[in-house]
Amino acid sequence: MKIAYFTHSLTSCWNHGNAHFLRGVLKELMRRGHAVEAFEPRGAWSLDNLRRDHGEAGLSAFREAYPELDAATYDAIGPVVDTVKGSDLVVVHEWNDPALVAALGTARKRGARYTLLFHDTHHRAVSEPEAMRRYDLSGYDGVLAFGETLAGIYRGWGWGRRVFVWHEAADTHLFRPPEHEGERAGLVWIGNWGDGERSAELETFLFAPARRSGLPLDVYGVRYPEAALATLARYGARYHGWAPNAGAPALFARHLATVHVPRRFYVERLPGIPTIRVFEALACGIPLVSAPWDDAEGLFSPGTDYLVAADGAEMERHLRAVSSDAGLRHSLVVSGLATIAARHTCRHRADELLAIAARLSAAALPGNLAMPENAA
């Protein structure tokens, strides 16, 4: 099968969590003998920011971990749309230019034989619905949504049975427990500050409980303004800046536990959707303690795969327990690893994608599938 994926960036994971998942899925598809191509626009802000901060050396971890992966950089939309006309499956991430999204749909309506899917992994459908309305999906065969609540929004927009839930997952070839256990100490949190949409939650569920429990806290990520850095300093957290995603397993392996603090939109408007760090942390065998979120789809077993804290005081109690109780740490690790292995690896997601593509027969043009007009 010839598969093309249009991403914001494959090579850069600077503030671009979808790159984590995409790398694992594309690698898995290649392992199965599929011809896979990735395309990213020249001037992608994630890659530009990575190069600004770290130069070409910032790409070293990606290249070492994924030597088989690369992305073709394109300038003009027309030629790259022509390039993929012979593909069997084309997937387009929602961080792409609306003009590219529309051009691929137009080519599909005009007879391109590929199955065309739109891949949404963000909260903009609820936070900026007017921006999502800029995408012309009238030529698309279906939508991949990374959670059921997001899929429900697309169903409300007329997609019916042609929207599919396609959760993120862990690339377990990279995200796995260390071969040899070494010394572990303190907490690690890998996440971006962003626009302050969870700053209060980070103080309540991470910085303050870590300090009160006496556990050193190492923080990695980008987009930390001066006010955020001052907050970290006030709580005694050690800020290390950006870490390549390929280096995250080594960071997890040096710490006793990590914490999940979901963004507000995923708690209030899109329940049931965890960040990819939950999948990755559990796959690496590190105990995880989470701020409240509703596992509405039953992806995990809260309380068994990881601990959940209702407030800052309970988070502190959980952190103290994880720190002092080796048996608790072991049980969390065993359960979390089993859940990932059973249903949340990139192998599982590759199976799901291929099944979706088979269901949406590329033999019929989108117009024959009762495609909603100007969907999304």
Image: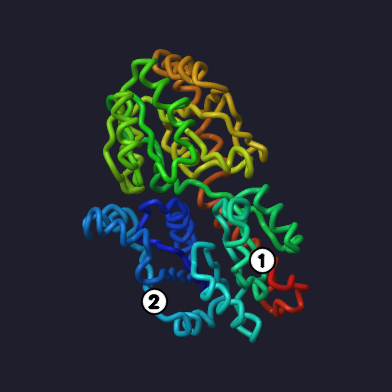
276 up-or-down from 54: above or below: above
As drawn, the label of residue 74 is 2
Number of the label disc, if any, that sits on residue 142: 1
Q: Residue furthest front?
A: 227
Q: Is residue 350 left or right of residue 150?
A: left
Question: Is 117 drawn above or below residue 262 in the view shown?
Answer: below
Left or right of 210? Residue 345 is: right
How far from the left and from the top, in percent, is residue 250? 31, 38
For the point 46% across and 38% down, the residue is 283
Q: Quadrant of the C terminus?
A: bottom right
**Measuring 59% from the left and 43% from the top, which residue is drawn there?**
273
Q: Position of residue 230 (x, y in %)?
A: 30, 32
Q: Which residue occupies the foreground of this view, 343 or 206?
A: 206
Residue kind at label 1, given as amino acid type: Gly
Query: Which of the 4 image quarters holds residue 241?
Result: top left
* Badge 2 amino acid: Tyr
What secondary structure is found at the residue carrying circle 2? Answer: strand
Q: Quadrant of the N terminus?
A: bottom right
- Callout 1 secondary element: strand
At a point 36% along the width and 53% down the height, the residue shown is 14
State whether residue 184 appears in this view: no
Q: Nearer the viewer, residue 145 or 61?
A: 145
Q: Nearer the viewer, mark 1 or mark 2?
A: 2
Q: For this view, does 35 lie left or right of residue 214? A: right
Residue 301 visible in the current orientation: yes
The residue closer to the viewer here, 132 or 173, is 132
Location of residue 201 with respect to 69 vertically, above or below = above
Residue 293 coordinates in the image, percent (x, y): 59, 33
Residue occupying the point 44% across, 41% down = 196
Q: Is 114 rendered above or below residue 58?
A: below
